[in-house]
Image: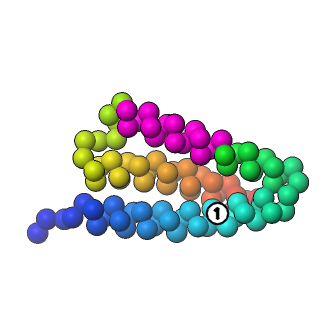
Amino acid sequence: MRKNPWFRASFDLFSLGLEVATVMTLRTAKIALGGAAGETESRRMVQEKIDSALDLQTRFMTGQMGTDGPAAMSKTVTHYRRKVRANRRRLSKS
């Protein structure tokens, strides 16, 4: 029986969504507290999103993301998951 690569991609996206929800909650709380830390977090969040999107776009344009849909999806999820996990660790310490 052949495995369906889209099923795995769907599961990975679902898992990433749960991790993103945690980071959004932590980030919202930090920004809501205001002050210099909240402002710094807001600026960092925007810059991270810009940098991440540009990096991913460059990878797609240079062929680093694979040649089929499931491979590209998997590498995209891996790209964002690495960044989300780093943010979760950093924000959990604050």
Q: Magenta stretch: residue 60 in it?
A: yes
Q: Position of residue 70 (x, y in %)?
A: 28, 53
Left/right placement of residue 4 relative to residue 57 reads left
Q: Nearer the viewer, residue 61 or 93?
A: 61
Residue at disc 1, secondary structure: helix
Left/right placement of residue 90 relative to residue 36 reads left
Question: For the point 76% across and 65% down, which residue is it?
Answer: 29
Residue 89, image quadrant: bottom right
Question: For the point 65% across and 41% down, which residue is it?
Answer: 47
- What's drawn in magenta, residue-wise? 47-61
Q: Is residue 17 above or below residue 38?
A: below
Residue 12, image quadrant: bottom left
Question: For the point 63% across and 54% down, which residue is it?
Answer: 87
Q: Position of residue 88 (x, y in %)?
A: 63, 59
Q: Label 1 amino acid? A: Met
**Disc 1 designates what residue?**
24
Name the image quarter holding the C terminus: bottom right
Q: Position of residue 56 (x, y in %)?
A: 46, 40
Q: Position of residue 68 (x, y in %)?
A: 24, 47
